[in-house]
Amino acid sequence: MSKETDYEALENSVKYIPWKGKKAEWYMWHKTFLVQAMIRGYHGILVGLEAVPTDETAKKPAILTDMTSNQKKQYNNYKMNTRAYADLLQCCTQDIVSFGIVDMAKDKDLMNDNTALAWKGLSDKFAGRNNAEKMKLVKQLNESQMKKMKPLTYGLRIWNVYDKELQNVERQLTITS
C-alpha cells in the first residue's frame, strides 16, 4: 500500500466477496479473501502473523496526542483488526454456520472481535484437515484418468484443464497435510 496504511483509507471502496458455506468453494473463496486482505493491509492480522493489542492497551494511546511510532502501529493494528473482522463478518452473512463462527470469535483480550481466531475457526471448519478428507483427495487423485481426447488441436486445451484439476487436488492434499 502507499505511505498511508491507515484504517480510513480503506473506507473509500468496499467490495465483499460472499461466502456461501460450501466446502467445495472454500479454496477459491479463501484465496480471494486473502488477496483482498493483502491489498487492504490486514493480511498479517488475519492469519495471526501480526500482534493485535488488547482492547485496554489500544484505547490508552487513542487518548494521547503524542504517540510513539510503536503506539501508532499498535493502534493501527487494532483498527485493522476491527476492519478485517467487519469484512469477514459481512462476507459470511449468507451462511449461518460461518456467521456463527465469526461472530463467536472473541477472547478475554479482544472482547469485540478477534480476526485471527475467526479465520482459524473458518479454516478448521471448511479446509478439510481430517483423515477422511485426505483419503477422499488421495482416492480422487489416484483414480484420475484422462478422458478420451478429441482431435489434437482440441486435445491440448482439454489436457490443460485436466492438468489444472489435478494440480488443484494436489494443492488441497498439501494444504490438508
Image (tube, grey):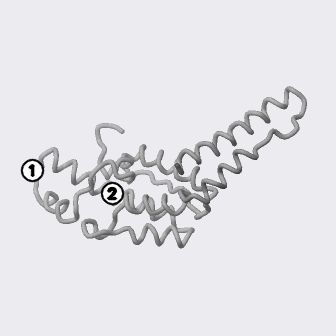
Q: How many labels does the image show?
A: 2
x, y (%) of residue 40?
40, 47
Question: Relative to residue 33, is residue 148 drawn left or right?
Answer: right
- What whole-number distance in Å separates the C-alpha atoms at marks 1 and 2? 22 Å
**Lower sequence index among marks 1 and 2:** 1
Where is residue 75, by image quadrant?
A: bottom left
* Residue positioned 71% across, 36% down in the render: 163
* Residue positioned 57% across, 58% down in the render: 131
Residue type marked 2 = Asn
33 or 27, nearer to the observer:
27
On-image quarter of the N terminus: top left
Q: Nearer the viewer, mark 1 or mark 2?
A: 2
Label pair 1/2, CB-CB below 8 angstroms: no
* Other-residue count near label 1 (Cα within 10 Å), few / some / many at <14 / 14–19 / ≥20: few
Judged from the image, the secondary structure of the residue bearing numbered disc 1 is loop
Circle number at residue 16: none
Judged from the image, the secondary structure of the residue bearing numbered disc 2 is helix
Circle number at residue 66: 1
User: Which residue in the structure is indicated by mark 2?
Assistant: 81
Residue type marked 1 = Asp
